[in-house]
Image (cartoon, rainbow, N blue to C red):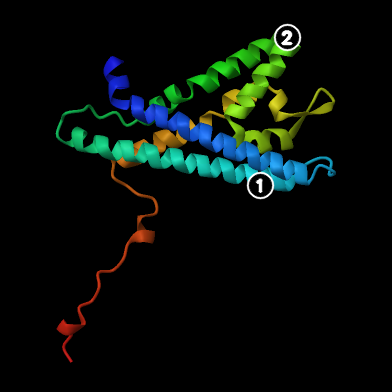
Amino acid sequence: MKKFFHEYSYNIVKMFVNQFAISIFGFSLTIATTSAHAESAGFDLLTFVVSIFAVIFYLFLIYTLAWDVGSKDKISVDVGKKAYRPHLGILLSLVANIPNLLLALLYAIATLAKASNMTFIVRLIATMLQGMYFGIITSVSLPLGGEYVQLNSLWPTFFLMVIPAMLISWLAYFLGLKNFRFFSFISSKKPPVDESKIKK
């Protein structure tokens, strides 16, 4: 475990920093779109769409980072310096998401204990830490107990929000380890033709 943190602590911290930066970005956009449509009631499509794009951008950053880590590890794996661990990406993301998971756990405990003050504070912190999801969890409601309840009022939501990042990190690391790029064909260019060598 000590070796793991020595080798990957920088990447883990970078994952969390990326999350924090996109969280502020997503939270700000959501607040802006919500304020612009404050007079409308019910589901706010613009806020939802903005939040979706913020999440996609966040996951893209996670994908890029994890792919690079896997690609670098491929060299050491190929020469036998490192063991082949195709699922390492999910572990990286799991460690990076420890603050989110702890807050989700605290929110679950506070909700089940019906500690309203603690519930509000923990939910606020947890929401701001994953602000890219803010528009989604406040726009979508589920019918429970005869009434509609927003996703941010349900404690399982905050556990579920870490799953996309963990899955993307796992997939990206694995693909990096295989040196496989999804969109390599986009950047592939045919070599320039030397017109001087073309026979007339």
Give the image quarter of residue 133.
top right
- State the quadrant of the N terminus: top left
Gap between marks 2 and 1 measured at Cα: 33 Å
Residue 179, given in percent of the width and then of the height, sits at 28, 45
- How many marks the image carries: the answer is 2
- Looking at the picture, does residue 3 appear above or below residue 39? above
Q: Nearer the viewer, residue 32 or 198?
A: 32
Q: Are marks 2 and 1 in contact (CB under 8 Å)?
A: no
The kind of residue on which mark 1 rests is Val
- State the quadrant of the C terminus: bottom left
Mark 2, secondary structure of its residue: loop
- Left or right of 81 on screen, residue 122: right
Give the image quarter of residue 116.
top right
Mark 2 or mark 1: which comes first in sequence?
A: 1
Q: Is residue 160 visible?
A: yes
Q: Which residue is mark 2?
A: 115
Residue 194, given in percent of the width and then of the height, sits at 20, 78
- Looking at the picture, does residue 122 appear above or below residue 160? above
Q: Residue at x 32, y 32 (%)?
A: 86
- Looking at the picture, does residue 146 appear above or below residue 182? above
Q: Residues within 10 Å of mark 2 (few under 14, many from 20)?
A: few
Q: Is residue 140 visible?
A: no
Q: Residue at x 21, y 28 (%)?
A: 82
Q: Which residue is mark 1?
A: 49
Q: Which mark is on residue 190?
A: none
Q: Residue at x 31, y 37 (%)?
A: 70
Residue 110, given in percent of the width and then of the height, sits at 68, 11
Q: Residue at x 35, y 60 (%)?
A: 187
- Left or right of 46 on screen, residue 40: right
The kind of residue on which mark 2 rests is Ala
